[in-house]
Amino acid sequence: MRAGLLNKVIKFIDNTYEVNDYGEETIQEHTEITTRARVVFKGDNRMVSNNEVVNIGTLEFTVRDLYAINHHMIIEYNSKNYRILGIDDTIKGQLTIIAELIND
């Protein structure tokens, strides 16, 4: 992997669930990792769901294989959150992550 291609800064956010004094489950966001990545646009999909037009963008992130990244993390890139769909680690030293945009 060429270091010059890792030109975008992304954050991996891991959510933890905690039970408070009242017994309700709350979500706490913890920024796990801030790293550099190569970002490639893989496609866009428009669909109608519940009489609402939804645009789903898919990106491919390539990062160094230095961190414990799992499918439960969320990627923050350009002030948008992306859900991890798949992680490919077949190439030594790098992870290729396919992620889709989370519509808010």
Image (spheres, helix red, strand yellow):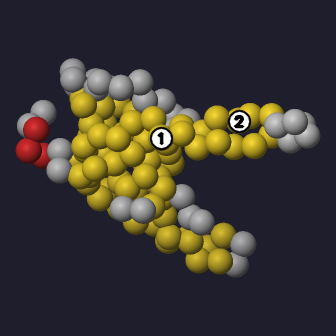
Is any part of residue 84 visible from this angle? no
Is any part of residue 73 visible from this angle? yes
Residue at image mark 1: 31
The residue sitting at 45% across, 35% down in the picture is 32
| Count of numbered circles on the image | 2
**Residue 104, disc:** none
Q: Residue furthest right?
A: 22
Write down the quadrant of residue 47 in the picture: bottom right
Q: Is residue 5 left or right of residue 52?
A: left
Tell me the quadrant of the picture where the C terminus can be found: bottom right
**Mark 2 and 1 residues: CB-CB less than 8 Å, in contact?**
no
Q: Is residue 14 left or right of residue 62?
A: right
Q: Nearer the viewer, residue 21 or 73?
A: 21
The residue sitting at 86% across, 41% down in the picture is 24
Q: Residue furthest top?
A: 92
Q: Amino acid at mark 1?
A: Thr
Rendered location of residue 44, percent (x, y): 40, 65
Rendered location of residue 34, percent (x, y): 35, 41
The residue sitting at 44% across, 47% down in the picture is 75
Q: Residue furthest front?
A: 21
Write down the quadrant of residue 14 in the picture: top right
Instruction: Classify mark 2: residues with Cα within 10 Å, few (<14), some (14-19) or many (20+).
Output: few
95 is higher (above) or lower (below) than 75: above
Q: Amino acid at mark 2?
A: Tyr
**Residue 17, disc:** 2
Write down the quadrant of residue 57 in the picture: bottom left
Of the numbered discs 2 and 1, the one sitting upstream in the chain is 2
Work out how far the residue at label 2 is from the one at label 1, CA to CA, in angstroms: 14 Å
